[in-house]
Image: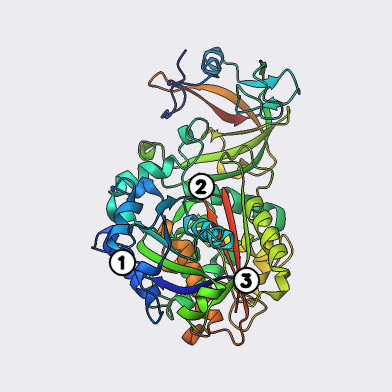
Amino acid sequence: MSFSKFGKIGYVSETKVADFVKHLEKGKIMATRCRKCGQLYFPPRADCPNDLSTDMTWEELSGRCRLLTYTTAHFAPTGFQKDLPYTLALARCEEGVNVYARLNKDINKNETRIGVDLKLTSLRLPDGRITYEFKKA
Amino acid sequence: MKVTIVGVGQTPFNRNCGVSIRELCFEAFKDALEDLNLTPKEIDASIICSAPEYDRQRSPAGLIAEYLGLNPQPTFLAESICSSSSTGVKVAYSFIKSGLHDIVAVIGFQKMSEISSAEVQERMGRGADIQWESPFGPMMPAGYAMCARAHMQKYGTTEEQLAKVKVKSGKYSLLNPKAMYRRAVTLEECLKARVIASPLKMFDCCANADGASCMILASEEKARKITDTPVSVVGIGAASDTQSTTGRANLTGLNCAIEAGKQAYKMAHITPKDVDVAEVHDCFSIAEIMAYENLGFCKPGKGGKLIEESQTYIGGRIPVNIDGGLLSKGHPIGATGGSQIRTIVLQLQGRAGKTQVDGAEVGLVHNIGGVGLYGNVTILKR
């Protein structure tokens, strides 16, 4: 299973957590949890540094989260220029993990403020690639 | 046994140096050796500092050591992006302290015009976690902008306070002939400039540059024969934080800088109050404000007030970046830490000219790689 469909532009194609994309295709945003120490990881990881365990289980995030910080970018790396301007955001999920993604453009400037509730959802891009984004709660 | 810096050198920083990387490094090397009783053959090892993704030459350490006459002595590359040359100093210190080598040259360089703007732009996007964050299109300014936004929300820091960091930088740039931008800017200009990544505008951001720096470190014993004005390295701290934004526990400061600062102060047996002059990594205006707080020059959240009260100008509580900082000098990645250390060494030797802080005895350098990824603090003493 390849990871290469993930994101507007993908830089990583092979990973032990490639199943993340399979779940994302079904609209599920998954974290991993270490069966040994119980730690929840997002972005998901296949290996736990706490106990060097590789015994992990997938766990779906509710998508309910709160905005921690954000910025609207007016300059972009190669390949992203046509999307400008876009807002990059960091949010805290109710499960206690942080997620980095863009804010959907349906959230206007006045509504964008630290502390506002957001909904994390999967997003199919026009070219068939898949990612996730924050929407209005 | 003390470890000292006996010589420092730097090329002018500019947009397009027009010479090859080996020639650029030669200029900084020559500048560092000026007035020293030292020849290249007497240098035991060289450490070359660069972010290699900007180099066309594979393994540039070999090429540069050859051109500087530093064969057959050992050489290698040290990299921690923007703090590469501080990392080089840490390694040189360890070499000398262990007795493995007595005299070590640390040469930092970056010729960012070596590759096209499009290539630079492409690499910028890969500075984040390439699996989970780069696919969303972040750049360096976006990372610091997110810190700025969080800092403004938590502490009430204003865009005017951010702009005042650049106003100070512009004032002192006029006194630094090696700075890329030598121009005073007004608060209004800063506030009206185009947005790069909100709330950061053009003058809140440093610019890519070409340049090289060089530091010669020597044991106390060897230093006596080389110069009359060695400066002692009395504190070194280094730390790291997560590469990912999602892993950060602190959004309004850089934990790697706090940790590196603690280590350096402890090793030097001093407190922030003892620092007479400092160079901090102002790749963005917010970075300087966070540095004030992370280094203990003021309490967390009071950085905006510190610049507003002009406490970081010469004559203030703690003069910071009085060579213009990265915001005016430009930021040739691998050379930047060496340039910062050069400024402090000149201050402690009493050779800083119009920006000399009277009686400066203790100086501090804060040099950060990435968006708070690698933290390095070096404390020097006359």
Secondary structure at badge 1 equals: helix
Q: Mark 2 and mark 3: span between their CA atoms?
A: 23 Å
Q: Name the residue type under label 3.
A: Ile
Asked if the residue under mark 3 is in contact with the one under mark 1, i.e. CB atoms within 8 Å, the reply is no
Q: Name the residue type under label 1.
A: Phe
| Dot 1 or dot 2, earlier in sequence | 1
- Please give the chain letter of the residue carrying mark 3: B
Q: Are marks 2 and 3 on the same chain?
A: yes
Residue B17's x, y, as percent? 27, 64
Position of the C terminus of chain B, as image quadrant, is bottom right
Residue B271's x, y, as percent? 73, 69
- Please give the chain letter of the residue carrying mark 2: B
Q: How is the image coloured?
A: rainbow
Residue at horizontal 47%, vertical 36%? B134
Which label is found at residue B26?
1
| Dot 2 or dot 3, earlier in sequence | 2
Q: Which residue is mark 2?
A: B142
